[in-house]
Image: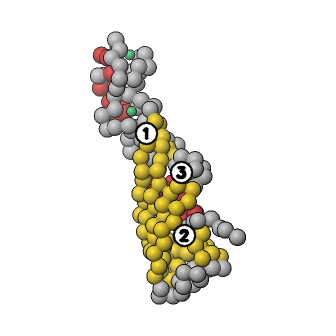
């Protein structure tokens, strides 16, 4: 039977205590999203890790790379990018807390690790560019492309203050 590409068999890798193996797997993460952005449906994430066998488990160290897309928070145009999340996590045969991931038999499932890493890095308020002019609050014109008759309002410092509040 073929498993998920994100499931690693530690016995097949010879990953006993003290051993180190590099794994580079690609798989999809359905439904990985936050307010503001998500990993596109069907897109592949790249899980690039060094696994080290330790008594009772495995330490995973490396990075997760994933494409994302969202809507610019100012002009609502579609923004795309790639995120990178550094990971250092522990898989245990007997997880005793929420801090570690389970190692079930010889199966080490990287999917929950990849999902958690991606959720941490997905931008919640993406911008198409730092200088995005956004939509005219009066008429809705995209000020990156259009000049409307309400330009004077856009220079109002109150808008800049509100925009600054949107950044965290
Ligand atoms: Zn924009
Ligand atoms: Zn306008």
In this figure, which residue is indicated by the disc labeled 1?
79
Residue 129, by quadrant, is top left
Q: Position of residue 117 (x, y in %)?
A: 49, 60
Cα–Cα span, label 1 and label 2? 33 Å
Residue under the point 38% across and 45% down: 168
- Residue to which mark 2 is pinned: 99
Q: Say if disc 2 is inside 8 Å of ligand 1.
A: no
Q: Is residue 10 visible?
A: yes
**What's the CA distance linking mark 2 and mark 3?**
27 Å
- Dividing the picture into quarters, in which one does residue 112 lie? bottom right
Answer whether residue 165 is visible to the viewer in this image: no
Gap between marks 3 and 1 measured at Cα: 15 Å
Q: Are marks 3 and 1 in contact (CB under 8 Å)?
A: no
Q: Name the quadrant where ligand 2 sits.
A: top left
Q: Is residue 86 above or below residue 44?
A: below
Mark 1: few, some, or many residues within 10 Å (few <14, many ≥20)?
some
Dot 3: few (<14), some (14–19), or many (≥20) neighbours within 10 Å?
some
Tag 1 and tag 2, C-beta contact below 8 Å: no
Mark 3 residue element: loop
The answer to whether the beta carbon of the residue marked 1 is less than 8 Å from any atom of ligand 1 is: yes
* Up-down relation of residue 118 to residue 20 (above or below): above
Q: Residue lying farthest top?
A: 149
72 to the left or right of 44: left
Residues under numbered marks 2 and 3 in contact, where contact means CB atoms less than 8 Å apart: no
Closer to the N terminus: mark 3 or mark 1? 3
Residue 65 on image: x %, y %: 45, 58
- Residue labelled with disc 3: 43
């Amino acid at each position: 039977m073929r498993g998920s590409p994100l499931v690693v068999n530690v016995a097949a890798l010879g990953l006993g205590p003290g051993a180190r193996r590099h794994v580079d797997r690609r798989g999809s993460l359905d439904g990985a999203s936050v307010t503001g952005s998500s990993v596109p449906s069907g897109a592949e994430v790249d899980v690039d890790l060094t696994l080290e066998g330790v008594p009772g488990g495995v330490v995973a160290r490396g990075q997760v790379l994933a494409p994302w897309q969202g809507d610019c928070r100012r002009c609502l145009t579609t923004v795309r990018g790639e995120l990178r999340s550094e990971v250092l996590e522990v898989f245990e045969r007997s997880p005793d807390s929420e801090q570690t991931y389970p190692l079930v038999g010889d199966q080490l499932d990287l999917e929950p690790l990849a999902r958690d890493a991606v959720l941490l890095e997905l931008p919640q308020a993406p911008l198409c560019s730092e200088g995005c002019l956004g939509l005219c609050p009066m008429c809705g014109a995209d000020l990156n492309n259009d000049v409307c008759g309400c330009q004077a309002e856009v220079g109002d410092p109150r808008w800049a203050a509100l925009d600054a509040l949107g950044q965290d």
